[in-house]
Image (cartoon, grey):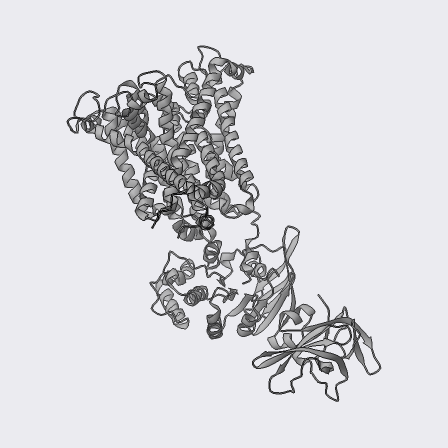
Amino acid sequence: MIVSGLEATVQQPRLSAFQWALLAPGAVLLVVLLVAPIALMAVVSFRPFIAGRVGSGAGWTVRNYTELIEPAYAFYFYDTLRIGFIVSAIALLLATPLAWQAARTKRRAMRVSILGLLIGLLFMSLVARLYAIQMTWGSNGPLAFFGTLIGIPARSAGYAAIQVAIGLLHFVVPMAAIILIGTFQNINPKLEEAAASLGAPRWRVALTITLPLAVPGLLSAFMISFAMCISNFVVPLILGRGIVLFTTNLMYVRFSDVANFPSGAAIGIIMFALAGFVVYALAGFVRWLAPAEARP
Amino acid sequence: MTRMPPSVGTVVDWAAGVMFRILFAASVLFLVIPIVVSVVLSFDDRQFLGPFPPTQFSLRWYRSFLDNPAYLEGLIVSLKLAVLSTLISTAAGASAAYVLSAGRWPGRDVVEMLFLSPKFVPTVVIGFSILGFASAIQVFDPFTRLIMGHVVITIPFTVRATLASLIGIKRSLMEAAISLGAPPWRAFLDVTLPLARTGIVAGGLMAFVLSFDEVAVSLFLSDPFTQTLPIVLVAEMRANLNLTVAAVSTVFAAVTVLIVFFLDRVVGLDRVIGQGLYRG
Amino acid sequence: MNSSGLDVVNVVKRFGDHAAVDGASLSVKDGEIVALLGPSGCGKTTTLRLIAGFEALDAGTIAIGGADIAKLPPYRRDIGLVFQDYALFPHLTVADNINYGMKQRGISKIKRDSRRRELMRLTRLEGFDERRPLALSGGQQQRVALARALAISPKLLLLDEPLSNLDAKLRETLRIELREILRGVGTTTLVVTHDQTEAIGLADRIALMNRGRIVQIGTAREIYEEPATRFVAEFIGRSIWFPGHLKQGTHGAEFLTDDGFALRINAPANARAVNGLSIRPEHVRLSARPNDVSRIPATVMSVEFFGAELIVACRLNSGGRVIRIPIRTDDEAIPVAGASVELGISPDRCKVVADD
């Protein structure tokens, strides 16, 4: 059938006054409350810090950036990225079976339970969840033996990193699983059936058919988990016991303990750039892996 | 009849199936156990933090929660903050989403990025930068600053959710209303708004939950006299481990169960996630 | 004077470099039903959207009842519009859908109710007041859309592909029904369609559109018998096309085809830019009569049986083109494959036109 309605989808070249009126409040809010503050922060990050004074001094300097290269500070960045990377990898491992079951189960009760759990966790207070993790995995908790099992006793300093990782996992696994549900749902089950009907065992079908098709989804789940981890603030704050600090916490400490605004601003700009890079890389990767015609 | 010896393929299949089930169970347990533990502990009658499980149960920690004015004050600040910032960001976000969905006008992609970007900026950066900006423009009232920060972090969620619900609304509906004599604003109120309602409500709900639980932005923008509930809780958790926080967490968990139940009834959990291409 | 008619004059609409509507003109008389017919992408939907006010004109005028409406916003044009997908408000009942336009006009509830009841009787929707649109069949939805558009007593009614969303089997019945309703209300109506059966079945006159212009306006019969261009001849009905040129022969006007036949024609009304000759296949006689002056020798290739008619494929001896001629099963001697025939063509059936 010829659908002449196609002609109607031509571009709308201009916004009407009414549309401007709808768009303006939000746009103004964001320019004032997001763009302007970050621009100001960028300026402050090049101002010298004068000890004992709130705010920043006059003149320009790059010292706030150069001092971050010193090993003492660089270590925080390294730690943040390292833990974020490991956690994102484990998150994929834990999220995949959840997402696969939710996407492919024939039982409605199973699907609704998994969806309910994942959405519930997204909606549940992270602070409350982190407290629950502390109670469960902390030195007094019923799962503290896990630390002894892997040779890092719950009371040791090294366990702080384990606890932060557990907290971050609890935070990102539901999100990764929800992304992967979307991925698995959009892989045509007929492809797997076709492969199986040709005599391929299930593990081979999974490795040769499902996995390659799921790569873009897995990758975006990984990248989003990674971005969420490295920009997280509360988890190390509560579970890090002051031993594990992320860049975010460092930024807060620079501001709250020594009132060094310019240094905090420099860290902020670097984190802003890092987050921007991760998002940009993610978009690029997904586009590269799934050319437009292959996407559903 | 002789049984065929199992082939290598079926053995691997069997092992992979077992592995999959173990991993699935581990994931579910990993996510659920801490919540169960904390719910159980909230009913612990012991005055100290004893080993799990508790030996006697009572509601003492719930009473302690109600007796502590810091919690209640925090709760009130958090509720006021969450309601106000949700209203602002839903109004601004939903109406912007409507314009974003109205075709491809020049500069649309840039504006869309502006509206979704707070999601990708680390919350500490938002908190820190707004703090500096607020003092530069002489805003020192902590509640105003908190609203500023919370509106920014919640806007992407209201925009996203509204956009998703607007995609299903055909443009011809709006044009039909206009051709029948309704000016565009009227057609928007009569047709678009009611049809996008579920998406707008879902976005508002997400904004509310996000604002209510926010720590990083609030930590920068509050002061010792205006503290949100999460800030009070974090301070409490870092200072001394008593089980009042467990009681609060249990209340949070109960509210979450209600929200999920509500979502399933009103929208359907399947629609929250999306059915995808190949599910009946 | 066109008291409540539509006058579209030299309308232009460009999207970037492309002129979707390129100087189109047409008028619909008061109470008349005109079909705007053309292939997909010819600019007819854009024309409809220009008249409704959803697109802004680049040039030209649009007037209803003599008054220019091009500057009016769409909600002040008093034009009833039936969308291709009906665009019924899914969250409102049938009654509220029909009431919507009257409410915008501040019409009192009593008047609204009586007008609605009248329209629902006319469109045979009695008893559906409280139904939701999605609970109705396609035909019922279409009638709700029609009643809703008529409720505002529009000066002009626009229908966008009114039957294209319906089951093919239902189309015939619904077309007749729709025509009766439109006749009954007597509103000036423009129907946009790509389907010639729909156009012929619904409209008093047809405006044929191609590449952004109106190429011919007339009754279905006029257009069929006197196509203005090759496009018209081939879009409405079937046509055999001979490229060639005019020539003044010894006995009068002649047309010399590129494959070498001289066909006698009646003197063309205007001879400018004529570069081809169109003839309807059913006007070609399989065996020439003695008084036929134009004869084309040909060989029968095959005969296909189609119930009431037969299609005879003939290869022209000169040039080798194959043309397909329908004959009635009962009226002529049925030729066999391989037979030599002389095709006869009368001058008044030959239409010399421009190949647009």
At a point 32% along the width and 39% down the height, the residue shown is A117
Q: Which of B269/A262 is in front? A: B269
> Where is residue C80 drawn, in percent x and y?
49, 63
Number of dots carrying numbers: 0
Q: Which quadrant holds the N terminus of chain A?
A: bottom right
Q: Is residue B239 left or right of residue C40?
A: left
Q: Is residue A179 left or right of residue C224?
A: left
Give how far across and how far down residue B209 sits, in percent.
Answer: 34, 35
| Residue nearest the observer in this picture, A269 or C54 | A269
Q: From this viewpoint, which residue is outermost toward the bottom?
A: C290
From the viewer's perspective, is A216 left or right of C286? left
For the residue pair B135 and B29, the one nearer the viewer reads as B29
Residue B168 in sight here: yes
Please provide percent x and percent y for residue B260.
31, 41
- Quadrant hosting residue C7: bottom right
Residue A80: image quadrant is top left
Q: Is residue A222 above or below residue B10?
A: above
A181 or A253: nearer the viewer: A181
